[in-house]
Amino acid sequence: MLKVLTMCPGLDEMIPGAYLDCHLMVTNPIDYVEPLATAGASGFTFHVEVSKDNWQELIQRIKLGGMRPGVALKPGTPIEEVYPLVEDENHVEMVLVMTVEPGFGGQKFMPETMDKVQALRKKFPSLDIEVDGGLGASTIDMAAAAGANCIVAGSSVFGAADPQQMISVLRKSVERAQQSC
Ligand SMILES: O=C(CO)[C@@H](O)[C@H](O)COP(=O)(O)O
């Protein structure tokens, strides 16, 4: 059980122009919509597994808070569970396919999650599809080829001798994959 919560009001002013992509691995995401809007979050991503009964209200509140709604799913959750949230009139704007079990950085990328990215890309050609967990030089091509276009990378960037160069490797892989479709 994780119990780590940090809110930093005014973060958007401290890093002007940065897109603050907030992924909430919490049981009651609705409780954090207002605090994150106040803190200056740009995107608010909640988990489908805990939002089966209130995702429509959540999306509405996130948008009213001036943030971009996204939905995340764990490795064991079927991709079909997010389809209604992408197809709804008031829909999410990003799907985050977790490529490790949510919890901690430094875990091993799960290649079997790529089937979900592929299915999503085939069904929604212009959707933002994010992947998170174990992304680095040896795994990025798999994710990019499957159709991911937003990459969350922790260890590979922060552990690199040259973080900027690692970001460039990740970015170029996604650009190459996009050009070849
Ligand atoms: O926090 C999580 C998963 O909950 C991590 O997936 C990080 O978001 C990325 O870390 P690396 O896997 O890149 O070290």
Image (cartoon, rainbow, N blue to C red):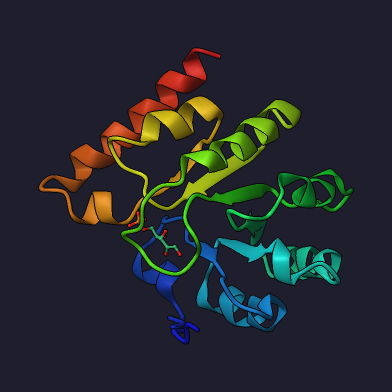
Residue 127 location, quadrant: top right
Residue with the most extreme left position: 161
Residue at 68 percent across and 32 percent down: it is: 119
Against 131, residue 139 (above or below) is above
Against 1, residue 82 (above or below) is above
Camera-side residue of 112 and 155? 112
Dividing the image into 4 quarters, which one contains the C terminus? Answer: top right
Residue with the most extreme top position: 180
Quadrant of the image where one finds ligand 1: bottom left
Q: Position of residue 117 (x, y in %)?
A: 60, 37
Q: Position of residue 114 (x, y in %)?
A: 55, 37
Apparent side of residue 67 relative to residue 59 in the rendered image (left or right): left
Residue at 39 percent across and 68 percent down: it is: 104
Against 40, residue 43 (above or below) is above
Q: Position of residue 54 (x, y in %)?
A: 84, 71
How many badges with numbers are in the image?
0
Residue at 67 percent across and 76 percent down: it is: 29
Camera-side residue of 127 and 109? 109
Residue with the most extreme right position: 89
Q: Position of residue 159 (x, y in %)?
A: 18, 55
